[in-house]
Amino acid sequence: MSLRSTFLATDSTVRNDSRGAPYLSLKLVDRTGSIDARMWGLPFELRSGLSGPEYVRVDGNAHEYRGTLQVKIDRLQVLDREEVVEEDYLPATEKDRQALAAELEISGREMEDEHLRALFERMVADEEFWEAFCTAPAAKGMHHARIGGLLEHSVQCMRIARAVSDLYPVNRDLLIFGAIFHDAGKIKELSWEAGGFAYTTEGRLEGHVVLGERLVASYIAGIPDFPEELRLQISHILLSHQGEIEYGSPTQPKTLEALLVSLIDNLDARAEMFLQSTENVSAGGWSHHENPLKRALYIPRERENEEG
């Protein structure tokens, strides 16, 4: 299938194939996602690869290689940034963000705990916060790395939390609140302008765990007579949701709600890593090892219809 379009080229590197011939390996990104690409017969200006993420015009062919869709590039032209609208190349969720946001808002209004409901409503009523929360990516590249990714991840975690709350003796409202807002600090940790996702200085220095806890605490401070015990439980969930100190949490989960939020977060993140890494893999094929899960991933063949 012939391909002629413009993309944001990332993860560019020059390698040698089995015959020792150099080729350019890269990812081609647009709003719909990314695809691996290769280019042989490199012109002089590409023999050292690209200096960083670049906007490019590509002529080539998309084909299946070992069960994975890949682009073989015939011609590649680097574009000036003035020639493109950078926002057009940011990956974005294909889901209805308004519908996802409405689902969260309904969940907040259904909370029986008056203090958590008041906190939820106060956060959603902050238009600047809520717009950022519904727009931000959930990560720079690991999972849900797309406009609306944080919202997608939060909704999925909320859905899992609702199901899990029927299985264990938990504070349902607290579990759901934590599942929704555990990554709230991502709106300050990440930026999603200038044609890509990047860490802010604030994010590099403090990280989304601390930033999120501080952000939610600022909303709690504006609610009169908010119970200190509940404030402490929320703080602990936010500070421990990464699960382990080596993963960025200053403390490990020590309540059932905190433990479950951590596990729910990890479940959805890793499932999404699998889906992202295999989106171009056909049935019976394997992904590359070069993915967030650091292993080749298999898509089983569809079972043949045995009826009849």
Image (tube, rainbow, N blue to C red):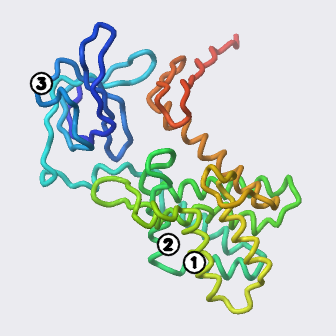
Which residue is rendered at x = 47% and y = 65% of the image? 187
**Front position among marks 2 and 3:** 3
Q: Which disc number belongs to residue 233?
A: none
Q: Position of residue 196 (x, y in %)?
A: 33, 53
Classify 10 Å Cα crowding around label 3: few (below 14), some (14-19), many (20 and above): few
Residue of label 1: 123
Q: Is residue 167 left or right of residue 85?
A: right
**Amino acid, disc 3:** Pro
Q: Which disc number belongs to residue 43?
A: 3
Q: Which quarter of the picture shows residue 224?
A: bottom right
**In the rendered image of this protein, does residue 224 appear above or below residue 198?**
below
Q: Secondary structure at mark 3?
A: loop
Q: Secondary structure at mark 1?
A: helix
Of residues 99 and 108, the one nearer the viewer is 108
Q: Position of residue 160 (x, y in %)?
A: 70, 52
Image quadrant where one finds the N terminus? top left
Residue of label 2: 130
Which residue is rendered at x = 56% and y = 42% of the image? 272
The reply to whether dot 2 and dot 1 touch (C-beta < 8 Å) is yes
**Front position among marks 3 and 1:** 3
**Amino acid, disc 1:** Met
First reached walking from the N terminus: tag 3 or tag 1: 3
Gap in angstroms between the C-alphas marked 3 and 1: 53 Å
Q: Residue furthest bottom?
A: 224
